Image (cartoon, grey):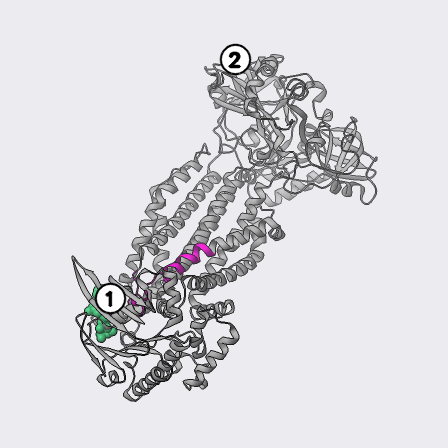
Amino acid sequence: MLSLKQVSKYYNTGSNKTYVLNKVDLDVDQGEFVSIMGPSGSGKSTLLNIIGMLDQPSEGYMYFLNEPVHQLKEKQRSALYKQNIGFVFQAYHLIDELTVYENIETPLLYQDVKSAERKALVADALDRFNIVGKKDLFPAQLSGGQQQLVGIARALISKPKLLLADEPTGNLNSKQGEEIMELFKKLNQEDKVTIIQVTHSEKNAQYGSRIINLLDGKIDSTVIL
Amino acid sequence: MIKNYFKIAWRNLWKGRVFNLMNITGLAVAVACCTLIFLTVYYEFSYDNFHDKLDRIYQVYNVANRPKGVEKNSAMPIPMASAFKAEYPAVKYVTRSGNMGGVVTYGNQKVDGDIHFVDPDFLKMFSFPLVQGNRNAALSELNSAVITEKAAKKIFGSKPALNQTIIINSNNEEKPFLVTGVAKDYPSNSSITFDILVRFEHFPQYKVEKNNWDSRSHIVLAEFNEGYNPQNFSKQIKSFVNKYYAGDIKNLKRDGAKPDANGDIFTLALAPFANNHFNNDIGGVEGDAISKTYPLSLVVIGCFILLIACINFINLSVARGFTRAREVGVRKTLGAGKWQLLTQFWVETIMVCFASTVVGLLLCTLLINQFKAMFKSKISLAMLLEPAHLAGIVVMFLAVTAIAGFYPALMMVRYKTVAVLKGKISGGKPGKLRNTLLVIQFTLSTLLIICTIITWQQISYLSNKPLGYNKTEVLSIPVGQNAKGSDALQLMRNELRNNSNVESVSGAYMNMGKGNDGSSMRSVLGFIYHDREVRTHLQRIDYDYIKTLDIKLLDGREFDSKFGNDSTGLVINESMARELGGKNLIGSTLPIMGGESPAHIIGIVKNFNFQSLHDDIEPLTMTMLKDFEINYIFVKVKPGNLVGAFDNIKSNWHRLYPNAEFKASWLNENTERQYLSERRLSGIFVSGAVLAIIISCIGLLAISIMMVVQRNKEIGIRKVLGANVLGIVMMLSQDFMKLVLVAAILSFPVAWWVMSHWLQSFAYRVDIHWWVFALSTALALILAFVTISFQSIKAAIANPVKSLRSE
Ligand SMILES: Nc1ncnc2c1ncn2[C@@H]1O[C@H](COP(=O)(O)OP(=O)(O)OP(=O)(O)O)[C@@H](O)[C@H]1O
Ligand SMILES: [Mg+2]
């Protein structure tokens, strides 16, 4: 479903280029659960952002669902993204001014989903993640774990084929982290959502089907579990 | 989705309510004053536009290229209009027009009225529809009169007016008239004003001057055929001018007049009636022409204020935008498109603008009465409901939301998603844009402060300059239409002889300054003296004039009843003496009034400002010729009890004339009244400056709050490292002070240029001093500093531990 060919990302620092990603080749199939690991500054987040189309590679090609992303116009890319990709962040990034319900609903608004359908979808999601009781609270009124749950519910509301998560458990304690990982596993196995997560935890990485180790912007090694 | 936009917008606005309140206040004030200003300006420019054939009507005036410069004059000889119509083929209709007060009598009813003397074509040219009577025949008879509905109501009450006979007493003549038409009341934005129209044949001196091309007393308006182009008028009219104005041309040539580009020394020219309200260039027009400076300066100031408020809006939105960068980033990751984000921010802008507009219009209703009084504006809020104005408001509303809302929204949408989510933009640098906008705001504010100070200086100079006569203790009484001036003067002299308050009594043809009657006349006359034309103002005075007004006599004596032949005597001023040249002028004869009655100089007085300080003191000749009526009685009273003296003289007047209004005023009131338009301009500048400063400071306050929030951590660290309060206040204010200083300096050349231009219109004017600029700059700096200090001091004295902990 996803294919990166010779993707590089560099920044111009002074006169010379600093490579954050250096000619990375990566293929991910439908239904995989990939964990990206590596030391701090190795380019994990950068890679994830490029996959998620939040950032653009300096060089190289990327194909997503057989579409050449590097050739697409802004609008097409945005449409492709909206329908197929969900993002989960370490810092949750919920919108402070919106309630739990509204946060979850927002992606649907941007996809012009009808009001009645929206209601049904959000109600489903609240139910599924067990946060019905919290639907009218604002993010500041939730614990970190609950916030991340809302973040995941929001990322999944539009039924994406690919879920990207950048250290989703980074700000959580180990029990909360475990619950999130179990959830990911379930999503991957039951709902067939393809997942790519960045993590620092060896344990969390084990939930996936493949571990990719990054070092200095290059894929150092790949472990298939 | 729309509902959602509004919901989110409302929550965001509420969250930033301090800023939004400031935003709304600033913008509402701007909306209020712009509404008032633009309505006023619209009103001024709408003058006379109700005439259907406005674009085809022109006023004729003459241009004389005198050796001293071009002189335009709109006074025409009585035979001119009919000759013009007969000999210039493009003329369709023509009317002479003159104005006079009169008393209308019907039965026992006596009513003051404004009498307009016109030709029958008048009603065909101008759109004054008749509600009764026939427009084409209404003025066909010599004794026809057309009156307005309003005047008819005053004179006849509810009785029918048509075909009634009224007696009009004007210029001391009583004549009967038959009402042949009732005109619909004309709108207030009409230059031509009248209560009664009568035939021009009743105009004073008509019979005497009927065929005299040298006596000029009224204006002439003409309607041309459709499609007429006035471009070649002066060429086409050449033979006409040569035929009828040969005398003028000869005299001008003799005096060394230089021909203009067309080779003309003297010519006729056309002024479009559409521009009548602003035509203060040709001497006399219908109504009171105003200078275009006044509406234009209003427009400029309205735009300034709107601009300043928009700048606030932009600066505040941009500043707020930084704090919302993360939200934008998140929304992008949730699939928000560019337009969706833009719309969301735009909705917020629209809500703020809408609130401002509503509050602004409310403010408008509160302020309109003061505004109308202050700027002599005749606007009403009902004018806002005219479709054109509603459209204007909508357009302005959209323009403001677009200008003030679009840029910040676009800037926010352009943030790089990844960077924002990493928290890289949240701090935000001040930015060139913000600084530029602040500089613009303060440039405009300082500019207005400078203009305020200089106009104020000039006005106080005008009020305080000695004019060469006593303006505090002399009362000027307009005689009005109820009596013959010379009789009234005689009666008042006798009446006041025993009044202990009164020192002396005299009378004159021209007033000093502008009296309560509002009229101003002048009479300029030329004659040949030693083979050269001498031009002089002519003033008819009476015995004791020089004494009554405390004018200084330099040589000779003033008119005195003890001397028998004073009716042929002349008293001249210094300028006139200089114009005549030579020494020992006392006793020389001057051939004034066509030389039929040579007069001799009996006295020379020191120059005094008999005109406003816009003009230099020109040659003046004072006579006791009976050809000119006494229009004003001057009474000098003993200093001390002016109020008592006034009441005293008033009761004397009413004893003589129980029915006539006592319109007296002190001369210093009259001279002040000459500068009403200057006062108005200065009022505009003051209000503009105050508003500009207030709105700019609101913006600065909001920005300083934002800045302190952003630099909270830095301030905390600095304090921990030992910085004192003053140091921190200085650090926070410094950048802004620099900007304000730059702004002030930028405003100097503009202010200097504008003000020196304005001062050019005064023969007597103040110099522009450097300290005015220094003072204005200091004022702007102090106001800005105080504004910023509210926040910076608060931040500086706050406990640093708090701000550091929250990071
Ligand atoms: N705008 C930029 N300019 C220059 N260098 C940058 C920029 N953004 C990121 N980098 C560099 O790119 C490198 C990779 O950053 P990235 O965030 O991908 O690392 P990471 O592997 O996610 O690290 P961590 O585990 O700490 O999250 C870092 O060394 C960082 O300094
Ligand atoms: Mg990272």
Residue denoted by label 1: A5
* Callouts 1 and 2 close, C-beta under 8 Å: no
Residue A16 occupies quadrant: bottom left
Using the image, determine if residue A73 lies above or below residue B578: below
Residue B670 in percent (x, y) is at: 56, 38
- Residue B262 is labelled as none
Q: Which residue is mark 2?
A: B529
Q: Amino acid at mark 2?
A: Tyr
Q: Is residue B239 left or right of residue B198?
A: left
Identify the secondary structure beneath mark 2.
loop
- Left or right of B511 on screen, residue B337: left
- The amino acid at mark 1 is Lys
Q: Residue at x 44, y 68 (%)?
A: A110
How far across and how far down the image is residue B388, in percent?
59, 48
Q: Is residue A134 magenta?
A: no
The picture places residue B18, in percent across and down from the top left corner, at: 43, 67
> In the figure, B595 relative to B424: above or below?
above
The answer, for residue B546, to whether it is visible in the render is yes
Q: Residue B444 at what x, y percent from top left?
A: 40, 49
Same subunit: marks 1 and 2: no
Of badges 1 and 2, nearer the viewer stands 1
Of B246 and B356, which appears nearest the observer?
B356
Residue at x-position 49% and y-position 45%: B299
Chief secondary structure of the magenta span? helix
Region in magenta: B401-429
Ligand 1 in which quarter: bottom left
| Looking at the image, residue B649 lies above or below residue B27 | above
Chain letter behind tag 1: A
